[in-house]
Image (cartoon, rainbow, N blue to C red):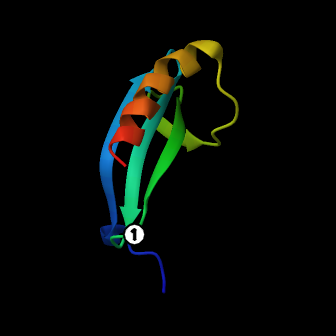
Amino acid sequence: MPYDKSLDVDTFKETREFEATRLTVAVFSYNGGEKKLQISRENRLAEGEWQFVKMGRLSKPEVKEIVPIIMKAVESM
């Protein structure tokens, strides 16, 4: 069965912006299934647009900002 975006429902989503990157913590449930946590990163291009990139490693300031968001996300699961 191919992926169907309309079946992928986000039940929680919060984003934090940093200097040239932003992190989003979200909880998704596909087709009524188990809720799962997703952390994604986007970097700002020179033109000001956002582009998805590999999550990679987190800096200490990034971790300090998103850990409380992760805890809120877990409560929504």
Q: In this view, does 59 lie to the left or right of 29?
A: right
Front-most of residues 41 and 74: 74
Classify residue 25 by image quadrant.
top left
Front-most of residues 4 and 37: 37
The relative height of residue 11 versus residue 14 in the rendered view (above or below) is: below
Q: What residue type is labelled 1?
A: Gly
Residue that appears at 52% across and 41% down? 40
Query: Residue 61: image x %, image y %?
Result: 57, 13
Front-most of residues 49 and 52: 52
Residue that appears at 57% across and 21% down? 63
The answer to whether one can see residue 49 in this image is no
Query: Residue 4: image x %, image y %?
Result: 39, 75
Residue that appears at 32% across and 53% down? 10
Query: Residue 47: image x %, image y %?
Result: 47, 28
Q: Which residue in the protein does label 1 denote? A: 33
Helix, strand or loop for disc 1: loop
Query: Residue 50: image x %, image y %?
Result: 46, 35
The relative height of residue 32 versus residue 76 in the rendered view (above or below) is: below
Front-most of residues 38 and 33: 33
